[in-house]
Image: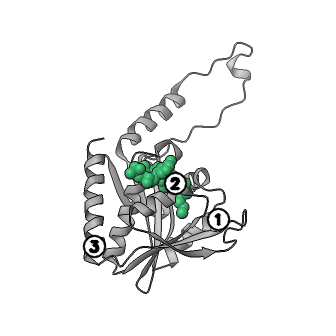
């Protein structure tokens, strides 16, 4: 498959922040990710890479760097020197989404999940959520929970598809616009009903992504 889930590392943080700025109205300070990765042993963060993008983006960047500068008005020698283009490392360029959770006793709290706007509606946000739920199983969580803006129907639809249900409201939870948060929970993820539904959805999704 062209899509790969990796554990987030410190070197991924600049690209994660780039995507976060495009995905959310307000963002964490860059130091927050570094702290999460270095100091929070209960935190699990992942990135989603598209192996095909790596080459395309590198080729574009290299062409940019090699293209001769043209000016009808000034001889080249009079133009200010252009800063060197930094070619992103293939690993960073390929990141198109990220997500994370914290384990609190036996509850997995999803803290973030975001796709770059250019790569939405292809099942990849769902792939991130499936990967988080897989992590929840691996680390022994019994339930998965999260907060989502009451206006964020897109994300709510995704969560409902995976069995999350509304369990209450946190009033004025988001400081940027005082919006309420919907609190959502899954059933116990080890219950036969949840496991079966999750496995069905996951295998349908993987088939769809394999075909891309
Ligand atoms: C939420 C988000 C991660 C979804 O990513 P995505 O890759 O576009 O979603 P997918 O293509 O995997 O869609 C999965 C499901 O989400 C829901 N969904 C996604 N886009 C939707 C849309 N525009 N309208 C309604 N439902 C939508 C659907 O239930 C969809 O399942 P379906 O394909 O069977 O209909 C993405 O929109 C995003 O990054 N948003 C900004 C950040 C954010 O709000 N994060 C959630 C914070 S709680």
Which of pointers 2 and 1 lies earlier in the amino acid sequence? 1
Q: CA distance from mark 2 to mark 1?
A: 25 Å
Q: Tell me, yes or no, if residue 114 can be seen here.
A: no
- Residue at image position (30%, 47%) is 209
Q: Is mark 2 within 8 Å of ligand 1?
A: yes
Residue linked to disc 1:
29
Task: Farthest residue to the bottom: give it.
Answer: 105
Mark 1 is surrounded, within 10 Å at the Cα level, by few (under 14), some (14 to 19) or many (20 or more) other residues, namely few
Task: Please identify, in this view, whether the residue under mark 3 or under mark 1 is nearer the observer.
Answer: 3
Q: Tell me, yes or no, if residue 10 can be seen here.
A: yes
- Residue at image position (49%, 28%) is 63
- Give yes or no for contact between labels 3 and 1 (Cβ–Cβ under 8 Å): no
- Image quarter of residue 211: top left
Label at residue 154: 2
Which of pointers 2 and 3 lies earlier in the amino acid sequence? 2
- Residue at image position (43%, 47%) is 94
Q: What x and y, as percent, mark residue 31?
A: 61, 68
Label at residue 193: 3
Left/right placement of residue 49 relative to residue 83 reads: left
Left/right placement of residue 83 relative to residue 2 reads: right
Observer-nearest of 89 and 18? 18
- Image quarter of residue 190: bottom left
Task: Please identify, in this view, whether the residue under mark 2 or under mark 3 is nearer the observer.
Answer: 3
């Amino acid at each position: 498959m062209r899509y790969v889930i990796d554990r987030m590392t410190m070197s991924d943080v600049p690209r994660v922040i780039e995507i976060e700025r495009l995905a959310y109205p307000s963002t964490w300070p860059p130091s927050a990710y570094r702290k999460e990765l270095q100091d929070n042993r209960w935190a699990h963060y992942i990135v989603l890479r598209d192996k095909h993008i790596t080459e395309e983006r590198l080729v574009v960047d290299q062409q940019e760097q090699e293209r001769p500068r043209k000016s009808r008005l000034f001889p080249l020698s009079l133009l200010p020197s252009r800063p060197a283009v930094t070619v992103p490392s293939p690993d960073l360029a390929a990141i198109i989404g990220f997500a994370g959770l914290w384990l609190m006793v036996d509850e997995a709290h999803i803290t973030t999940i975001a796709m770059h706007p250019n790569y939405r509606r292809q099942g990849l946000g769902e792939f991130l959520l499936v990967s988080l739920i897989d992590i929840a199983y691996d680390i022994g969580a019994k339930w998965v929970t999260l907060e989502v803006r009451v206006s964020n129907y897109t994300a709510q639809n995704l969560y409902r598809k995976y069995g999350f249900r509304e369990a209450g409201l946190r009033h004025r939870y988001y400081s940027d616009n005082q919006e309420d948060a919907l609190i959502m929970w899954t059933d116990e993820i080890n219950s036969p009903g949840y496991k079966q539904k999750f496995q069905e959805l996951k295998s349908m999704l993987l088939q769809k992504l394999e075909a891309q």
